Image: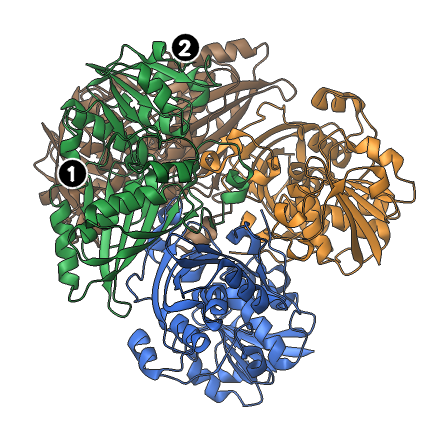
Chain colours: A orange, B brown, C green, D blue
Amino acid sequence: MVTAALAGASGYAGGEILRLLIAHPEIEIGALTAGSNAGQRLGALQPHLVPLADRVLQETTAEVLGGHDVVFLALPHGQSAAIAEQLGDDVLVVDCGADFRLRDAAAWERFYGSPHAGTWRYGLPELPGARERLRGTKRIAVPGCYPTVSLLSTVPAFAAGLVEADVVIAAASGTSGAGKALKTNLLGSEVMGSASAYGVGGVHRHTPEIAQGLAAAAGEPVTVSFTPILAPMSRGILATCTAKLRPGVTAADVRAAYEKAYADEPFVHLLAEGQWPATQMTYGANTALLQVTVDEQANRLVAVGVIDNLAKGTGGGAVQSMNIALGLDEELGLSKVGVAP
Amino acid sequence: MVTAALAGASGYAGGEILRLLIAHPEIEIGALTAGSNAGQRLGALQPHLVPLADRVLQETTAEVLGGHDVVFLALPHGQSAAIAEQLGDDVLVVDCGADFRLRDAAAWERFYGSPHAGTWRYGLPELPGARERLRGTKRIAVPGCYPTVSLLSTVPAFAAGLVEADVVIAAASGTSGAGKALKTNLLGSEVMGSASAYGVGGVHRHTPEIAQGLAAAAGEPVTVSFTPILAPMSRGILATCTAKLRPGVTAADVRAAYEKAYADEPFVHLLAEGQWPATQMTYGANTALLQVTVDEQANRLVAVGVIDNLAKGTGGGAVQSMNIALGLDEELGLSKVGVAP
Amino acid sequence: MVTAALAGASGYAGGEILRLLIAHPEIEIGALTAGSNAGQRLGALQPHLVPLADRVLQETTAEVLGGHDVVFLALPHGQSAAIAEQLGDDVLVVDCGADFRLRDAAAWERFYGSPHAGTWRYGLPELPGARERLRGTKRIAVPGCYPTVSLLSTVPAFAAGLVEADVVIAAASGTSGAGKALKTNLLGSEVMGSASAYGVGGVHRHTPEIAQGLAAAAGEPVTVSFTPILAPMSRGILATCTAKLRPGVTAADVRAAYEKAYADEPFVHLLAEGQWPATQMTYGANTALLQVTVDEQANRLVAVGVIDNLAKGTGGGAVQSMNIALGLDEELGLSKVGVAP
Amino acid sequence: MVTAALAGASGYAGGEILRLLIAHPEIEIGALTAGSNAGQRLGALQPHLVPLADRVLQETTAEVLGGHDVVFLALPHGQSAAIAEQLGDDVLVVDCGADFRLRDAAAWERFYGSPHAGTWRYGLPELPGARERLRGTKRIAVPGCYPTVSLLSTVPAFAAGLVEADVVIAAASGTSGAGKALKTNLLGSEVMGSASAYGVGGVHRHTPEIAQGLAAAAGEPVTVSFTPILAPMSRGILATCTAKLRPGVTAADVRAAYEKAYADEPFVHLLAEGQWPATQMTYGANTALLQVTVDEQANRLVAVGVIDNLAKGTGGGAVQSMNIALGLDEELGLSKVGVAP
């Protein structure tokens, strides 16, 4: 058995990692830590995690987290580096925060306002070459939820050179993506029956991460217009992505590129033609469901993808990458079946 | 008092028109008709309309609808022309369907698959020149809900020549926009906790209507990429709209154009800088709330608008245009205050 | 015109009072005050109240609130008495808090843990004799939202002696009833897709208020078992109420008692037989919709009532009682039409 | 491996059974059948069941269903008997419909209006003696969703003689409990933001099933007042249950009875004192979470329980009972961890 510790067990990302690790046949769950909630029973904070209800949260220190084979970090941005440094190089550290996702230090500093901590292997195995880079690594940067679905929805088109290097993405997310923070705009009374936009105008922190992934696929810089929408649901992201088609590209070319890209992927599925994805189809699952079409009038490719932001978008992606890094079966502990309706 | 009849009283659009007419100080509600629901008490179908609970729905015929000063048509697409022809030229006919919205007969036939019935005055008073064209008219085509919010969000930019003639719109709508039709994908179990895209790739029928409005504002054809999203809420549309900025256009230019366009409008409001709209702010109200910004990195204007699809997007827009056509105070019977939270 | 001030303008109750006062033809809205939000634009806090967006909130003091004909208090429990004392006896003070609802000082102290401030006229005009007691009064205690719907649903049965003095009420409420407080269990992510019970076992503070109203109707003490349920919606309360039938009472007796009780009430409606209320029917309206039946097997009356907790349950009830106290038309500024769907 | 067939694969109950069987390590999924949807790809109807997307639904006949070790029936009430008769006595038939739940033929006929088909072993293993009766059986009647949570919430009190034989239950359910039927009142626009009561007055078909279970526990007939509430969520039931305490019963007695009843149960959990259940805690899981208290003022026990109506309330209960009947580990294929938030 592989032992795993988790820092940040009282938040939504931490809770999702635990939900998945409980079902993972090769993982033994070790220390669970928290910040201000240290000392509390997990059952008081995450009552859905019934088998761990009596676990008591410890302080988030390297001493507590050390001595496990894997350490998951589900901490606020900027806190991972200090902990990671104290964990040995033989420990697999899986960071669900943003700290090690970007390669461009200037972009990091512009969007996060703090010094760049470095760059780890990017935990989106379905990107070209990514799976191989994850094997055996000891440091994984789990992608952001918006970048996960945005990149899965568009990379095949950019990698195949089908579209111009200028993409517009509008993505509707459930509220859990904003975490458990106590903010008025996240109250149930505010979000139910309401949709809103936020982080508009290229200021959302996931924008440079999407641009980084697309540039790698396209082999050139890609301009990204990204607008996140807060939708009245707890989980799920739906991304609508569009880019101008390059001359001569047909609908058949487009479909072929996506089919080829994901033919062997266990968790990413192009739906049958004419069927469009809904976030519910991926609720609690590690799947991404996609559809793509061509808008003849506007000469655009339009791709739509859905994931569960906490599952494939955070905890599931983390566990999948961990499986690869550890040399385990990539699918262990992960579901391909959404909890629907 | 002005007498008003309504065809299609059992549906969502019809119910919303009645909700507003009940509160209208100059309207006396006359005949109410329905299709298969003729003969039923309104209270059994629209129990929220308490003051009209004992009204019995009649058959939808010109005989029943005739003899009123105003006739609202809230019928399935394609059914308005036959009824309207039989109503005298002295009757104000307000059509909430699509039949008379488009000027381009070919576009109509391509998107609706039936012969074009004609073009009436377009009931979006905030468009340049539209209010004047509505005064005294006897035939009004109420805009679609998506075009209402999309045009209000973008026309000032196109009219001022700030952006290129190529716009990308992704809009999240509540389910009432799809009407009371009994379809599996509209069941509560399917839509709650879920977001989905539909009509993707330029095939949604509101696409040519948006293009028509933008072309009029821009003075040239505008390419429209439109992606509608079904969001888990009953009412409300949030539209995110983006287009490339023309050279030299600044954020100040953009804000000034919107401020000028809507300075005197009673129902359309540009929010204070930095505040972003949520659909809840317009729930049940005839308001449209907007915000606009510039994405420096992507060189794009991004405009976000919200309306209540049934209010400003259908019934409220219909009543507002009726007020203008009849020479009444434009604001009569219409609220500027959303029912929030 | 009657001038009105409001203390507590940044909360949900305060926002709802303003929503209604904006539409009230006899009211001129004066000073608006807040606690920690004093100094802010109302538009930043209550963006749905478009016509008041530029109002700036003042400090909650008797100086600011004085000099108006009416003062609404939408303050946390325990804060109303100190303010009210400083307002003259010629000012109509309408308290939306709990401070002056209970007659039994011991019950107050047991449930609220502070000294009893006194008892004002109870603002539920539909209770026997209540409307008369409100005329001309200068002090009104607006009922709690749960008591409003619970009493409207059951008082006719108790007043007519149809049931035993032992009632069981389970009521599902939207989250706005809990206010804008920043609590984890009120986050959208927690409440969407979820129902929970709270205040179980007779400990909810509305329990003695329900018991007080029922005892007055029954002419004897009534035992109340009250269980509130938090439902995933912003607004609305549905109360299910059941009590044992007294010997010989028939379904016809029950229906007759409710019909008689509410025959002349403008805002309370017994639905047609066989039709059951949904909270959506009252969204934003001052209506209460009821249905009642007899369970032959269990020998119980079962009454179900719905209101909008913020409208009839708070702000609407406050305005209705104000209208009566001021000698205005009781229906002024209040809607009988729900915003549905 | 055990082979399993399913009749009714296009509905919500059928979909949930498949969701669980996919994850079941000892089950091989065989024939899937449907009524009007026969001939369709499962992926078009249940797109969340990704691994089975290409399965084609067959006609529901004994020929198709025969030849498997287990046959699940997720059919409309009244259709199971005819199929079951044609399946051999060596086939385990698990009926998710109501046909074989009731022992009292007269009650069946009164509530279902058709001849009584018989009585099978009742698939609620946590009831006294039920687990033993399920071992080795070839015919299982899966309980209704409301009876599952109602009985789990109250049987310990009745079995221990703590309460009088007169219980009041109000239970809020998600819409999936009503199935995929195309009814106006189940449309998303109608249910979102709204709570309603239905089947009020003892007429809901689950009432006699609850009474049957309680009578068995109490050793005497129990009067049941049952009011179901439709809540705006896809899944989940919250039951609030109350009955008068017998003389001398203390809160400690109550807690002790529940602790004892469920101490060894893998899926039923009494929460820590003071913590109240929310349906989200059981989303997708086979768990039931309970809390119980004493209302001193009303002299009542109040028990609150939550389940996922499709999981523990239908498909999970079915799989759990199948496991027992087949002699497998009872927990196989079933989760104790809810998908939250």
Q: State which quadrant residue D20 falls in.
A: bottom right
Looking at the image, residue D306 sits to the left or right of residue B138; the answer is right
Query: Please, what is the three-letter code of the amino acid marked with disc 2?
Result: Lys
Q: Which of C124 and A162 is in front in this view?
A: C124
Q: How far apart are marks 2 and 1 (CA)?
A: 45 Å
Front residue (pair C46, D202): D202
Q: Nearer the viewer, mark 2 or mark 1?
A: 1
Element carrying mark 2: helix
Q: Is mark 1 on a helix, strand or loop?
A: loop
Q: In which quarter of the image is the N terminus of chain A?
A: bottom right
Looking at the image, which residue is at 68% across and 44% down?
Answer: A40
Establish if D18 lies above or below D300.
below
Q: In this view, does A69 lie above or below D335?
A: above
Instruction: Identify residue type, mark 1.
Output: Pro
Q: Say whether marks 2 and 1 touch (CB < 8 Å).
A: no
Q: Is C336 in front, or is D78?
A: C336
What x and y, as percent, mark residue A169? 60, 33
Q: Where is residue A267 in the image (x, y as percent from the top left)?
A: 69, 53
Q: Residue farthest to the left?
A: B67
* Residue B260 circle label: 2
Residue wearing tag 1: C266
Residue at image x 21%, y 52%? Answer: B44
Q: Is residue B301 visible?
A: yes
Q: Position of residue C161 (x, y in %)?
A: 17, 55
Tag 2 and tag 1 share a subunit: no
Question: Residue C5: x and y, percent?
Answer: 31, 16
How many residues crowd around disc 1 within 10 Å: few (fewer than 14), some, or many (20 or more)?
Answer: some
Give the side of residue C20 with respect to residue A192, left or right: left
> Chain under label 2?
B
